[in-house]
Image (tube, helix red, strand yellow):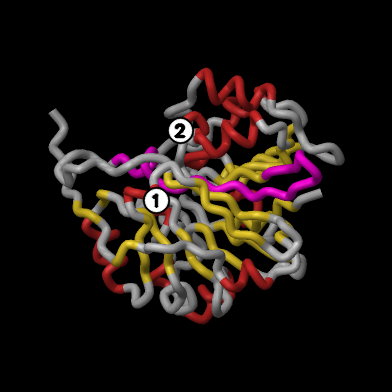
Amino acid sequence: MTAALKRARIGGADVANIKAPPAVARAKEISGARIYDVGQGDAIAIIDATGRTILQLDYGGRQGNPFEGKSSVEVDRMLPVPKGALVMVTHWDEDHWSSGPKGDAAKSSDWLVPRQVTSPRAVRFAADLDKVRCIPEAMVGTVFEFLAANGDAVLWQKIAPSSPSPSVHENCNKTGVAVALLRRSGDRGQVILLPGDAPFEQVPLFQNLYRAGMTLTGLVAFHHGSKYHWTHGTRSMLRHWPVTPGGPCEVVFSYGAGNSYGHPHLDRYDVLAGRQVIATPSLRAAKTGYHDILFR
């Protein structure tokens, strides 16, 4: 029998009212998502038309990260979080926040995080943040919308409540936050899906966008391209989701080369017609550092 993992509940005050962060509200438009090479983990900037970060989604990077031996100034340059840009955490697995202690810019920012049962190490990190607010369990299932000036939107949803018992293994993947970027065009539009580690099948927000006829411009593979939690519903959704005209659907796999988890399983996404695969280890080899998925 596997021993129970030590778990604790993330601290911080529950947020009562959630409004669009000023950097998003001031932006003329949302141009897309910038996926950084952070080794094993996720760090995604939501960017405006100038390429400036207006919201940072996750700030991870554990095994194989490019920050070893770098100063905090260098980390801030490689993974910039401008003043006034909110940092959101999809969930508290360490590869989604572990770059936070390495620099200064992210630590000094406002953080919006899900209330979760997770590792004591994550709880200690959250307690050290000066400005952290928690998405309470009462907001599970509600879709929130951060709007730019032109109507482009960051949509997000906490998908399930956390386990009530801190002695039970973590269930962060299925209780975290899933995000979609939306550019509307009449009663239709195009989307970029940013699920964190949440399986597509677990995200009602994604299902609603699919049923509404939004086209798919790109996505970041959930759980770094893992084969786990892959369902018939996810396969069917991706097979039948129409791709935005003007180019392939860009599928980014964010993972550490040679990681011990066996990520990714690229074949799972073969069901997506007209896809273009981008793997973050290739970004390091090309010395580019990130890849942008942009609205068309």
Q: Is residue 276 visible?
A: no
What secondary structure do most residues of the magenta stretch adopt? strand
Q: Is residue 39 left or right of residue 183?
A: left
Decide whether residue 184 is among the magenta residues: yes
Residues at marks 1 and 2, CA–CA distance in whole angstroms: 14 Å
In the image, 238 versus 24, the foreground residue is 24
Label 2 element class: helix
Count of residue discs: 2
Q: In the image, what residue occupies the spot 45% across and 67% down?
A: 68
| Residue identified by numbered label 2 | 202
Q: Examine the rendered structure and indicate whether residue 268 appears above or below residue 100.
A: above
Amino acid at the residue labelled 2: Gln
In the image, 267 versus 216, the foreground residue is 216
Q: In the image, what residue occupies the spot 57% across and 26% down?
A: 268
In the rendered image, which quarter contains the N terminus? top left
Q: Examine the rendered structure and indicate whether residue 77 appears above or below residue 197.
A: below
Q: Position of residue 221 (x, y in %)?
A: 56, 39
Q: Position of residue 22 (x, y in %)?
A: 58, 73
Q: In the image, what residue occupies the spot 50% across and 53% down?
A: 42
Q: Quadrant of residue 205?
A: top right
Mark 1 near mark 2, Cβ–Cβ under 8 Å?
Answer: no
